[in-house]
Image (tube, rainbow, N blue to C red):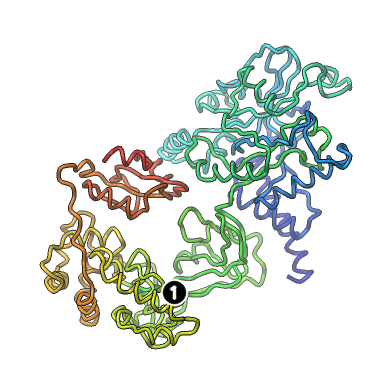
Amino acid sequence: MKASEVKKRIVALRTEIEKHRHLYHTEDTPKISDEAYDALVRELTELDPSSVIPVGGKILEGFVKTKHLVPQWSYDNVFGFDELKRWDERNRKILSPSFRGGDVRSTTGGVLEYCCELKIDGLKIVLTYQNGKLVTGATRGDGSIGEDITENIKMIKSVPQTISDKRTIVVVGEVWMKKSDLEKINTERQTVGLAVYANPRNLAAGTLRQLDTSIVASRDLQVFCYDLEIVNPLHASGEGGSRREPGEVFETHEQELRFLKQNNFPVNNKTKTVSTLEEVQSFVDQWIPLRNYEEYAVDGVVIKLNDVTLREVLGHTAKSPRFGVAYKFPAEEVTTVVENIDIQVGRTGVLTPVAHVTPVLVAGSVVARATLHNQDEVDRLDVRIGDTVVLRKAGDIIPEILQVLKDLRPKSAKKYTLPDTCPVCDALVSKKKGGLGDDSVALYCMNRKCPAQSLENLIHFASKKAMNIVGMGEKIVEKLLNEGLIKTPVDMYSLKKADLESLEKFGDLSASNLLESLETSKHTTLQKFLFALGIHHVGEETADLIANTFSWRNNADLFEKMVHTTDEDLIKINGIGTTVAESFVDYMNDAERQEVVKNLMDILVFEKPEKADVKNLKLAGKTFVITGTLETLSRDEAKALIKKHGGKVSSSVSNNTDYVLAGEAPGSKYDEAQKLGVKIIDETGLTKMV
């Protein structure tokens, strides 16, 4: 960007950040996710490193202000191991003079230790005890002054009203709401037409700032405490003096947590003290997938120096303590800028608008493109070239534009409309009719011989979940098509070694390996073959349902049965609807496609489907959905095991789902199962069932 554009962007970012900061901290009604907010802040600090973002919010009307005895800081964020190392290096540089150039160690002589705690996504509270009684409960506010919410805090059952220690003690914690309670409350609100809470944090914050304590009492708020300060009585009374109380001195953060537990404060036990940054990273990596299994929301890990004395030496920056840092989990929502929009033509001819965005790290990988689905979605979002957008990628979902930050829209932003003709072959585009006669939302290229469709169909045919032709990747397929060596999948099986060796960067070994893979792929299942054909609406599970209905003597017999099957035959299959039935029959009734299918079936050898163990149909009538990465089984192996014992496997979670088999990083299907009350099992649970 030009210098003038950078200045404008900085001003716009500051305004946008302040708006969302107010919505989050003061109104408890955020319009973007924490991750998207963090992305805006990171962009601002990269453009203007001198920028200081205030933390906290204003005091709402109806609440009394209260001054904190101990300033309430906010931790700086890091977003990767390199940033974590830089944080550690800065600390060691500050501490090194105290060790006369030697290795920085703890005050007891041991190596530096780091205490790792889960970063609970809730509302920070500050509890003050005097003479063993809770005298004040407050929000963080701006760090110096918060809202006095003492009566609401007293409604939280796990917060001690009295403790045995008579000193002035300030305890810091995080109030949170169970995910299951959020679902119940949102269901109740929907039934009476009220807006739902977006996440547990919003609900916890909104509840604590109610003026009616009975509402707070009814919502079963939870709390985790993680820090404390024993305050000098003179400091507490405003007469001056040191803030720290002489007497008991905590040497480590672990001792502070132990003190909290001994005095009946709820403390999260998912903590770990380690001695290397590599161990810190391992703890973070461990919790990225595990966070989905907790009742509380977790958005990162807080890392603190375990040595309390060294914390005093390190001190604070203008807004944050140096001894600790918040390591945020890989964002599934970030902000970026739409640089252009173009069209991708799929194997079924569907035209999908794709946004080319400024490359950004999301969910652990760099993303430069995001789907906009169709024209209706472009119009709904009102996304334009030049817009700043919130981009989402969760689990195995294709990156997509979630929201446009219209206050950051430049005057030069351009609207986008899908073309009337295919950008590849220039044929007319139109909407297709659905199974019930309804117009589809998507536009389709009506030229079935469109080069883009041909390419995508060939890539799909060779893919791992289809014919699994190893070495026949996208670039190789494109080269073969461009050289005129293949036009249909049948041509793949006619390739000669000389054909392959003529391709650029394709040697003897590569050619031999690909030919061997083609030979291996000839032995397959009917389910994989039907999926490989790329019939519209026929995915893996649907192909399996259809394949299981056919019995045949040989391939010629099977071909006749496939081309003569009717809509009525297919609709009788549980799980097959009108749209799928019509699509399959239309495909098989097309003369050109029939010829391709017949020629392929003359080449291929289909394995007879493995019959279910009739003596042990323990999963009969049960429907499973698989999500996440399994530890010992591949997805195909898990599917085969379920089907062998009479079960069915579906691709989506519904009220008809009996079990969700979840591995690591399960994604949105896991969340959907929780919402619907579907039982979630792991591999061990599955093997016990069979």
- Write the residue at 80% across / 43% down: 92
- Write the residue at 44% across / 48% down: 666
Residue placed most toward the observer, 546 or 160? 546
Q: Position of residue 28 (x, y in %)?
A: 61, 40
Q: Is residue 421 above or below residue 111?
A: below
- Residue 62 image-quadrant placement: top right
**Which three-letter amino acid code belongs to the residue tagged 1?**
Glu
Residue placed most toward the observer, 343 or 12? 343
Graded by Cα atoms within 10 Å as few (under 14), some (14 to 19) or many (20 or more), the crowding at tag 1 reads some
> Where, quadrant-wise, is the N terminus in this rendering?
bottom right
In-image side of 294 versus 680 (left or right): right
Q: Position of residue 594 (x, y in %)?
A: 21, 78
Number of callouts: 1
Which residue lies most toward the front here?
509
> Where, quadrant-wise, is the C terminus in this rendering?
top left
In-image side of 465 versus 327 (left or right): left
Q: Position of residue 338 (x, y in %)?
A: 59, 67
Residue placed most toward the observer, 225 or 599? 599
Q: Is residue 221 above or below residue 636?
A: above
In-image side of 510 versus 17 (left or right): left
Disc 1, SS? helix
Q: Is residue 175 visible?
A: yes
Q: Is residue 31 visible?
A: no
Q: Is residue 586 above or below residue 665?
A: below
Residue on which the image places disc 1: 474
Q: Position of residue 683 (x, y in %)?
A: 37, 43
